[in-house]
Every structure is written in C-alpha cells, then in structure tokens.
Amino acid sequence: MTRISVKVDGTTYQDEVEPRLLLIHYLRDRLGLTGTPIGCDTSNCGACTVELDGVSVKSCSVLAVQADGGEVTTVEGLARDGELSGLQRAFHEKHALQCGYCTPGMLMAARDLLREHPHPTADEIRHALEGNLCRCTGYQNIVQAVQAASEQEVSA
Amino acid sequence: MTDQATEREVGRARPRKEDARLITGQTNWTDNISVNGLLHMAILRSPMAHARITRVDVSPALERPGVIAAFSGADLAEGLGSLPCAWPVTEDIVLPDHPPIAVDEVRHAGDPVALVVARDRYAAADALEAIEVDYEPLPPVLDLEAALAQDSPLVHSDKGTNSCYVWPLKTGEAFDSVRERAEVTLTRRYHHQRLIPNAMEPRAVVVTPLAASGEYTLYSSTQVPHIVRVMMAVVTGIPEHKIRVVAPDVGGGFGSKLQVYGEEALALAVARRIGRPVKWTESRSEGYLATHHGRGMIQDIEIAANRDGKLLGLKVDLLVDMGAYLMLVTPGIPILGAFMYPAIYKMDSYDFTCTGVFTTRTPTDAYRGAGRPEATYAIERIMDDLAVELGLDPVELRRRNWIGHEEFPYTSIAGLTYDSGNYEAATDKALSLFDYDKLRAEQADRNRRGDSVRLGIGVSTYTEMCGLAPSRVLRDLRYAAGGWEAASIRMLPTGKVEVVTGTSPHGQGHVTCWSQIAADVLGVPFEDVEVVHGDTKASPQGMDTYGSRSLVVGGTAVHSAAEKVVAKARKVAAHLLEASEQDLDFSDGVFSVKGSPDARKTIQEVAFETFTSHDLPDGFEPTINAEHLIDPDNFSYPHGTHLCAVEVDTETGQTHIRSYVCVDDVGKVINPMIVEGQVHGGLAQGIAQALYEEAVYDDEGNLVSGTMTDYFVPSAADLPEFTTERTETPATSNPLGVKGVGEAGTIASTPAVVNAIVDALRPLGVQDIRMPCTPERVWRAVREAQA
C-alpha cells in the first residue's frame, strides 16, 4: 500500500492505495465520484477523461499513485456554485449528447482543446476529439457545441 | 392573444430535461450503484470457439484473498434454466439448449465456464486465473455454406444439423414466371459483415437480495426491463412478483441491450445462493465476446425487369449467421427484413427464403435497424447495378418504380400496407440540396481526365417498418409476446404531472418528448411534467424500447392517456362551474364556460379539487388519473432519400465522403432537435458499416478484432458533416401522425456510401467491394479490375 494525497474537484483526499490501482477506480470506487465513467479497457474511448495538473488524461491509463500530490478536475467539478460552464451549457443547448455516457470525457477533452486553441475550426475540433468516442450523436452537434462555447469564452 | 401555434410544445426544439444530470456527472449508471456488502462477480470465459469441458476446478480460486465464492457451470446448473428465445420463427425451428453458463461444452469464444465472487473487482479478476479448466477441442463451425454440408461438424451435436430454420415468403406471380418474361435479370451476392454494437456504456448488472422475503431487485443496463423481469422469473424460477427490475441510466443500446443475458441470470442465481448483493460489469473486451453482435449474412439476390426499367420481381436467398445460440430474438432479425426487400417499389413477384445457420461464434441479434438495413442494402445496391445495365440514371430508375404519393395506402408485394409517403417530395428535395446535376458533371469531367481521385455518387432510398408492432401480426410471425405499450398519467394534488411510461429510454430523450406531448394535451407547463420510466415497480407495464417503437406506440399511449385525464377533469370542472360538460371550452389547460369567460377552472385546480374530493359529482371515482394501453393497428413507415458523394483515391484506396445529404420523412415531429440528433447518430453507424467496422474471426474461431483498438469505432475525425432535412407526411395510423426515427439513418446510409464508392470506380471496371470498404480493399479492387 502507498499513501497518496490528491486534490479532486477542490477537496484534498489522503488514502492508502495499492500501487496498481487505476486513477479511474480510485475516483469511482474509493471516493465515490462516479460522474466519470469507464467505457473501455484499452484507452480508446476517452469516457474516463479527467484533468490532472492542467492537462487532460485518460484516467484509466494513470495510476492513482501517479496522481499523488496532484490536482484532479472531473466533470463533477466543472460547474461552480451551480453555474454551468460554457461548454456544459453549449452541450445542452446544441443537443451534443444523447445517452450521455461519453459526455464527461468529451467535456474534459473539449476543455483541454479550448485552453490550447481558444478558437478552433470545425476540423480542428474533430481532430482534437479523436480520442473520445461517441456512439450516439455522429459528433456533428458536439462539434457545434464546442464551436459555440469557443465563441462565448476564451477559456472554458 | 398570442399565436397559439407558437406556444405549443409539440414541434419545438426543446433542449432536453435529461441533460442536467448527464452534463454534470450526477448519473446513475448501473456500475455506479453501491450498496452495503456488495460483492463483485467476474466470469471465466472459454478461450476456444468449440470444446468439450472435461474438468473444472474452482477450488484454487477460493484460496485467493478476498474471494467469497466460486462456481462452475455444473455447480449452478440446478435451478437455472435455458436462456429464452422468444421468436421461434417456424414450427420446426431447431431450438438448442442455452445454459447461462456452460456445463459440458463451450460453443463460442467467450462462453462462460466458471465465476468468482469477491470483495472487490481486482480480487475477483485475479482469482479467475486460479481456476483450472481442461478442454477437449472440437472443430469450429465458421463458414455459413460449409456448415450446411452433410459432413460438417455440428455446433449442437444433439440436433443433427447446423440449419436452424428455413423461412419462406412467396407472394404474387411465381418468380420463375417473371424471370421467363423479363427482358433483363441480374443476380448479385452481397455480404454483411458482423458488427459489434458498441454502446458506450458496457453492460452491468447489480442484484440486491432480500433473503427473508425472497425478493430481488435486479439493476441492469438494459433496454427492456419489463421483458427481463418476465424472463428472469422463467429462467431462475423466482416468482415474477418477487423480482423488481430497474434500468437506471442506460448508456446507449442500439439493440445490444434488447436482450436477456446470461449474466443477469447468473448474478441473480449467485445473489440468491449466497444471500449477498452482487455486481458484474463487463470490460469492453469481454463485451466484444459476451454481448451479442449484429448483421452477419450472405445475400443472394436476383432482380427481373424490363428494358424500360419496370421491375417485375425479386428473389432473395439469405444465409444468416445465428452464432452459437438463439438469444431473445435472434431468428427473427432477418425476418424483420424479409418484408423490406421490395422497399418502395412496385413489382409483380417476390420470392424470399431465409436460412438460419448455427456457427461457433458469439450469437447475433438486434443491431440498429435489425434486418431492415440488410434489406435496404441489397435492394439499393442491385438497383444501382440495374440502372447501369439499362443505361438509366439511378434516380430515374427508382422514380419509374416507386409508389406514387397518390397511390397510398398501398399494399406492397410483401404484404405490408404502407399508410402514407411521398417519395417524390423527399427525393426532389434531396437532389436539390445535393446539387446532383453539378456533381454528375464534375464526375464525368474527372472520368474524362482520368483523374486518380474519382468522384462517386451514391443514391439510396428506403422505407422501413417501425412502431413495433401490432400484436396480431407478431402472433402470425410467431413472436412470443405482444407489441402494445402503456402510459399512465398521475395528476398530483399541487397540479404537477407524472407521466409513467412503459418505454425504457437510453439516450432517446423520452423524458423531454413525453413531457412535450403531455403538456400540450393537458395545457400545463412543460416544466410541470416529470416522466417516470425504467423500473418495474414504478412503471409496472411496458414493452420497452427498440425497433423505433417508442414514440409511435409509447408516445401515442401518453397522448391518449392525457386525453382521458382531460375527459375526466371536464366532468369535475363542469360540476364545480355548475355548467354542463358540453358548455365547457378547454384550451391551454383552462376549462371555461362558453359565453362566461370568467367562470373558469384550470386543470391543475381541478387536480387539487379532486385530491380533496370535497365537492365532486355524485358517484365520481375520486381521481382524474388515467391509464392507456395501445396496440397499434399497423406499423409506421418512415422513408427518405439519401445521397452521398465520395472522392476515392485510386492510388491509396482512401475514401473521403465529400458531402452527405439526407431527406427523411418521419411524419410529424415532436422535437426537431432530437430528430436531427437521431438521424446524425444513425448515419454514423451506417457509414461505419460501409467503411470501418467488422468483427473479424480467424480460422480457429477466435475474435481477432477483440478490443476497441482492433475494432474501428469511428471518431469525429472519421465522419463528415451531414446535411439533414425533412419532408413531413403524417402517418395516418396514429393520432400524433408520427413514424419513428431511431433507425432511419442507419438503414439508408450504408448503401448510399457503398453505391457511391462503386459508382466512382465503375469506369475502372470495379463491380463490387465487400464491406467494410477499407483503403486496402478499395485499392485491391482497383488493382484487380485493371489487371
């Protein structure tokens, strides 16, 4: 067991974890933060994407011990004081989700994109989100939502 | 007065009520569920396609840390029946036994052989490695034609054959006779590769037992909680009234969760055995073996026509891969397609035969469209070839044969009565949006120049049978259940409304759409309506969600239940306003007395008065709540025209979709934003079949495309921007005029894309490319044609 200290969505947690414990399982099974789902076992789908120390990561590909001392933001930490982020609003208004299972990861990946490229073209959005799979929407409304959010705000 | 039409909910692009939780992570996926003492189940699966099990020893697993119990198939056999097939399509169908966990023989890679229950998911997975199993290999059965040969090894040796059933449909003039008089006949063979549905949420099951009373709650990522409840009672022997099934948030289904799975029965059996709550969640790779696949058939099709393009008849012979077992509706999937091969065309003869074949692969069953994409693919592909043969434009050939808008209702050669449609309007709109003539001119120019990047134009028209289904038709097709749907409306004392639906959404937006429907009929604000679904305790009656049925049948039930509420409320309002019912107007939720507009009661006030029951008409049952069950008289028939332009690089084999235009007619629209989203998603899956996806097996029966790394689910970068438009010809078979939209995009897009690729390469001598049309296959087809 290894002792870790991780700040998740503004709260610091200290836990003893097995070195092999994945960050996604730490979030879901230990902290009960089930807002971030798991969609595959090969790092292809991106459903589990979170932000770790300012960059988006697939939390199925990070060990909990690697997040020691770090700061994690999940989909559950995007809204502040009940106020949705611009991306969350845009996903709702543009109907960029259907079943919603890919949405947490999609939001986190899009947030990462907008931080790096505040005003991406549709094509840039499509390529930036290549690591996040959606089976419901055909992506068209996701692209439109990210574009809409990029017009509203410089940093998501 | 404001314009009433603008105030109506139906037709408005309402952002969805469902989103608030989904975009903030406040979700309730089955795998999120945690209860005190929860144990985790992991399943050991066969690494072989076909083998006899000679020994299973689970005892070493019990030594592993955290393990509570371990079972072999034999350990669980008692009290665990065969998984059900609810659609034995013929009287003499071969129905093999399907134990939820194999006892003496495994018949596909991934067939369960043993399981472990442990305190956490890591411990459960670790312990699987300790289980010892000895297998005696048996020959795999993989080739659909070879499987039917006399000397073929058998998937189910006790059955003496790999042929599951032969289902014929012959209507109109004998096909031999039209073949005789036809000026042209064409025959083609098409292959539908197996597809893996890939709902983004892997399947999961949680069972919580109440040992003292013998009650069980089963949470499952399912499209069909009501069906699962009945079937769990049948499979496990637990009385139905002691089983509650909940479909919490469900992350997509596409048919793959229209199923009664072994893991549901196993979790229930194990929870009963050990008296502890149990969870099982599949990994994606495990799901590729354990969750049913779709498609998987060989189509031989022959079309007979005259030189002027007039179709005379169609002959279709299918060989369909059932996989190793018959699941809930496995045999019925190609039969849903059987009626759709004649599509939107008039002809004199139709001759259809489907043969179901057992193989040692994961079972097949419903995948978005379920039989109808396969039918549309075959007819639309051969129509393009016929157009070439006759020297006609492919749109013109279709125009010469389709049912004219003035001919509805029209009984198709396959015996379906299409209630409505306007193929001319949809096609004309599509051609104009696509700029068809200009693209044809560019294509001719590129061909003339011998451009290495060719332009191809693909046409696909379609209709589909949706709104499953009239129960009597289902009886005639030997389906074991009905096709009705239920809704009830509860008017709460404060005037708020609960709509209870028997449909079970998993992304479709029923909460929003049912709210829109109820709000309009009741005249209450959209925000005052909540929709309850997916729990057999809260919504005891339902036939669930599949086959583009939910709006057509379930939405109509909501509409009719709301009308009943209004009728009851009218009696109370009349009494309170001291007027006769006939003298009351009802508009925007307000009952008012004709001629005295100040004498009024809102329906929400009536709900409160009914709650107190202090002053109701004599003998009035003190409720204005209402329930409605509806059994549709007919299917609904969405239709449309899809046009696809591709650029195919003949040197690399790469296909690029340059434009995609579709005009769909799904009847009246409740929420245009949701309809458009359904079309987008359908297109993505249909295009994925054309270009990217295939479940590949090797010669031993191993699933080679066994992970998401090896199976190509397209990303945003792999799909084009779509132009989606609609025409609106209301269905006449339901009061809402709706037709259903869930599968339209998938049905039409696959042939549109492949027709476009073949159209691009035909000048180079290419006649056909097998799906998925990968760069390698396209490149090889070009090379072979030029050799």
Image: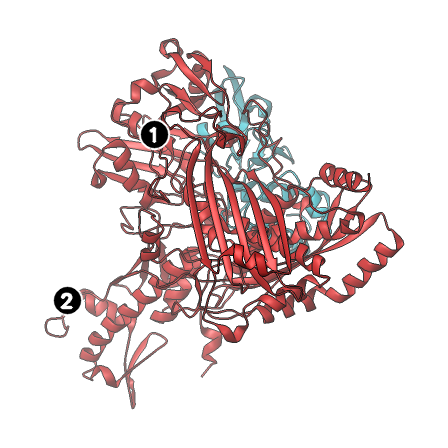
Chain letter, cyan: A
Closest to the camera, between mark 1 and mark 2, is: 1
What residue does disc 2 label?
B621
Q: Dot 2: few (<14), some (14–19), or many (≥20) neighbours within 10 Å? A: few
Depth order, front residue of B771/B577:
B771
Q: Quadrant of the N terminus of chain B?
A: bottom left
Residue A78 position, x and y percent, is 55, 44
Single out the residue that lies furthest toward the bottom. B595
Kind of residue at disc 1: Asp
Label 1: state its secondary structure.
loop
Q: Which mark is residue B352?
A: none
Q: Is residue B582 above or below residue A85?
A: below
Residue B522 position, x and y percent, is 34, 70
In this structure image, what is the colour of chain B? red
Q: Is residue A7 visible?
A: yes
What residue does disc 1 label?
B97
Give the chain letter at badge 1.
Answer: B
Label 2: state its secondary structure.
loop
Determine which quarter of the picture holds residue B443. bottom right
Kind of residue at disc 2: Glu
Task: Work out how far the residue at label 1 is from the one at label 2, CA to CA, in angstroms.
Answer: 50 Å
Give the chain letter at badge 2.
Answer: B
